[in-house]
Amino acid sequence: MEHSIVVSDVVKMYPLGAGKVTAVDHLSIDIEQGEFVAIVGRSGSGKTTLLNLLAGIDRPSSGTVRAAGADLGSLSESGLAAWRGRNVGLVFQFFQLLPTLTVAENVMLPMDFARKVPVRERHGRARRLLERVGIADQADKLPATLSGGQQQRAAIARALANDPPILLADEPTGNLDSSTAEAVLKLFADLNADGRTIVVVTHERDIRSMVGREVTLVDGRVVQDGRTEVPA
Ligand code: ADP
Ligand code: MG
């Protein structure tokens, strides 16, 4: 079976004073293409570290990560950046939109980096993505003038800029009120219905009704891995 992401016996240690902290501890997980996975666990359980390893933002201390057809450990820094630009969309808790660019310009920025979308198509594509996430009317505004929910929708449109097969989101609803959070999670569910592989770190309690699989981390290890439905 084709796997979108395969994490094999990964350890990630950080230096801490005189000793070391093991943020991810001999963790293995397979995520199939088209799965919608929630990563849950207490603060400090290694969720962000795991997401950064999947995105190739961090490298493991040992073990391997394969994602979207690449062995991330075999790629150079520039090779990783190019791989990430084409294959991974990232969404963060605090949106991380560039404040001096308009919403549409923020969405076009990853297209300019990855050069996957032809220049003449970038503006139209940004508009269509903003329509898709329901904020086409905000395209020419600066991010600071948008609500939190609208800013997160803009960040999701930006994550979709290069049509990546994988979307990774680190507590994307952590800074939103509960009804806005639910709308954002529904948007992720829609994007998953398109066939995208989605991994979301979240504290939302009602995520179970939306995701196909919930994985619980404790001390950098998977302690629970439940599929609520077997992916086709
Ligand atoms: P979570 O996202 O679940 O809150 P993290 O992945 O951020 O957990 O952190 C896991 C563990 O690794 C924690 O003990 C944290 O303090 C430690 N850690 C994370 N990032 C770093 C870092 N850059 N340097 C040192 N320790 C870190
Ligand atoms: Mg975290």
Image (cartoon, rainbow, N blue to C red):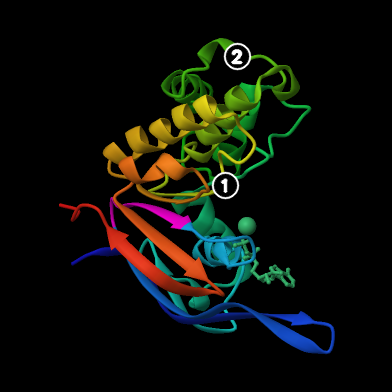
Amino acid identity at mark 1? Glu
Secondary structure under the numbered disc 2 in the rendered image: helix
- The percent position of residue 136, horizontal first and vertical second, equals 52, 14
Asked whether, in this view, residue 210 is left or right of residue 12, the answer is left
> Between residues 189 and 166, which one lies in front from this camera angle?
189
Let me know if residue 105 appears in the view.
Answer: yes
Residue 82 drawn above or below residue 127? below
Towards the viewer: 69 or 219? 219
Quadrant in the rendering for residue 111: top right
Q: Amino acid at mark 2?
A: Gln
| In magenta stretch: residue 36 | yes
Residue 102 pos. (x, y %) = 69, 22
Of circles 1 and 2, the one toward us is: 1
State yes or no: Cβ of the residue under disc 1 lies below 8 Å from any atom of ligand 2: yes
Q: Residue at x 54, y 74 (%)?
A: 220
Q: Which residues are magenta?
A: 33-39
Question: Which of the two labelled residues, at mark 1 and mark 2, occupies the earlier sequence position?
Answer: 2
The secondary structure type at the circle numbered 1 is loop
Write down the residue under mark 1.
Answer: 171
- Structural distance between the alpha carbons of marks 1 and 2: 23 Å
Residue at (37%, 68%) from the top-left corner? 224
Vertical position of residue 32 compared to residue 124: above or below = below
Crowding near the residue tagged with mark 1, few <14, some 14–19, many ≥20 C-alpha atoms within 10 Å: many
Q: Is residue 75 magenta?
A: no
Packing grade of label 2 (10 A; few <14, some 14-19, many >=20) is many
Q: Which residue is mark 2?
A: 138
**Vertical comparison of 188 with 215: above or below:** above
**Nearer the observer, 58 or 79:** 58
> Residue 173: x and y, percent?
56, 38
Q: Residue furthest bottom?
A: 18
86 lies left or right of 30:
right
